[in-house]
Image (cartoon, coloured by chain):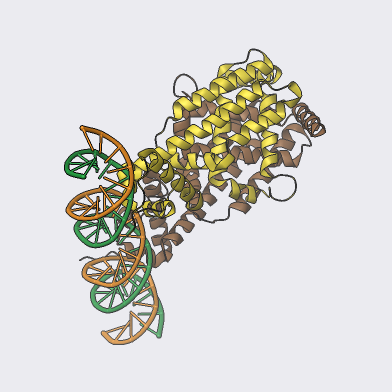
Chain colours: A yellow, B brown, C green, D orange
Amino acid sequence: MARKTHKSPEQAREAILDAAEKIVVSVGPAGLRISAVAKQAGMAHPNIIHHFGSREGLINALAERVGQRATERITQAISEALEAKPEDCVAAMTHVLDMAYTGDEGKVAVWMHLSGAESSLKSNMQRIVELSHQLRKAFHGDVIYDNTNRLVMLVTLALVGEVVSGASIKGALGFDAKQGNRAHFRQWLAEILLNLSDAELTTSLTEVALKMQAQN
Amino acid sequence: MARKTHKSPEQAREAILDAAEKIVVSVGPAGLRISAVAKQAGMAHPNIIHHFGSREGLINALAERVGQRATERITQAISEALEAKPEDCVAAMTHVLDMAYTGDEGKVAVWMHLSGAESSLKSNMQRIVELSHQLRKAFHGDVIYDNTNRLVMLVTLALVGEVVSGASIKGALGFDAKQGNRAHFRQWLAEILLNLSDAELTTSLTEVALKMQAQN
DNA sequence: CAAATTGTTGACAGTATTGTAAATAGGTTT
DNA sequence: AAACCTATTTACAATACTGTCAACAATTTG
């Protein structure tokens, strides 16, 4: 009966995306139903189609928004790490990893991507690699760019894995038991990442690689 | 008209699982429709319900089968690495990582798990950790079990990430360009894993951790 | 104040999918 | 050969979801 007051298109879109994010967090990526989003946003479902064109349009818009926000948090954390004192380096690096998860945005970003959303992944990832390389250079002098690329890839893949089935794997490996909770794992990983940038480790690695190539 | 010859229940189940695996590989985990599986297997879809009870029953059975097979391949690869000569260690370790992907089974296992299948993940993972720890001990003497656990977790998470969105991330990071294809990344990771077991790295890591704890 | 614009909604069409029920026939046992 | 078991199928029920359409009302513009 009583119609809702008209929101501006921007307000409506934001409200719908907020609702969609909540729904995705609670039911997973495949369970994103337009009707459920509409109910959460307190409107009728054709209104969503009016604003986003289709279900796929909604998914792409949500992917774009959460990807942008997550990238913002991560890049800011790396920038902060760039200015951290040496004794704070592990904490700063741990904070960088934390930022990939905060507020369910990393989870939603991965899930949206999993649903086939396109988004501007490439430019976001390249910003992160660029800053990460600056971070490694600040810590260890001149380092190999390819290794930064690979490290970022390893961490990114692990983050995706954590989002997708981290809870199950953690449970299967008994990580709930004593000290091995998620935060501790991230700190452990942060330490490894910092040490992996060390020049002596790099040479050690290339030595092994050379030995192997000679064998082929 | 012409009815199919009756298969034994075991044969029928295997044929259906083969079909389901193909379907999942081609359309992804969320797109698993029992009608499509039935078409692929050349039978009517109620027959699948007859043999597996429901769509969920089919998913669980498929998860169990691919999980078992993938675990078999991985554990065998680790066992082989245990008996490898020192100069073959990187190749053997790379082979272990390769085994997690071979034949789409790793991909399907992750995807099925993603669809909510239960399966015997815990016992499989623990077998892998146990063998991995033997491998690390063989290479580096007595090492910390928790670190083996964390390394297995890191690699497993990265494998899951690779399965879920490895192609996109690889593309976003420009890994297609020169030498950074998937196989090279695995070899690079294998080298890191072998070197990470080194005692000097472990002490370096714990030193950083102690320094950070003192700071808190 | 009138008219246009557009955000919003209820009703509906169309399709896809899972699962059920009864019937049929291949294979096995007595 | 008869009877039985069950793998298999056709037809159907029931539901759920996306997207369309025409109408309505809130807001803005002339």
Spot the residue most to the right: B214
Is residue A68 at least partly visible in the picture?
Answer: yes
Give the left or right position of residue B34, taking residue A182 as reference: left
Q: Nearer the viewer, residue B161 or A62?
A: A62
Q: Is residue B205 above or below residue B51?
A: above
Give the left or right position of residue B152, taking residue A150 as reference: right
Q: Position of residue A154 (x, y in %)?
A: 57, 31
Q: Quadrant of the N terminus of chain A?
A: bottom left
The part of the image, by quadrant, that contains residue A136 is top right
Q: Quadrant of the C terminus of chain A?
A: top right
Which residue lies at the image location 74% right of the left edge and 21% below the top edge? A86
The part of the image, by quadrant, that contains residue A64 is top left
Q: Nearer the viewer, residue A103 or A100?
A: A103
Give the left or right position of residue B79, taking residue B209 as reference: left
Which residue lies at the image location 59% right of the left edge and 18% below the top edge? A214
Q: Position of residue B37 (x, y in %)?
A: 35, 55
Q: Position of residue A61 (x, y in %)?
A: 39, 38
Is residue B85 at least partly visible in the picture?
Answer: no
Q: Nearer the viewer, residue C13 or B105?
A: C13
Which residue lies at the image location 64% right of the left edge and 16% below the top edge? A137
The part of the image, by quadrant, that contains residue A129 is top right
Q: Is residue A142 above or below residue B71?
A: above
Which residue lies at the image location 78% right of the left edge and 34% below the top edge? B141
Q: Nearer the viewer, residue B150 or A43?
A: A43
Give the left or right position of residue A197, taking residue A27 as reference: right
Q: Position of residue A50 (x, y in %)?
A: 30, 45
Q: How many marks?
A: 0
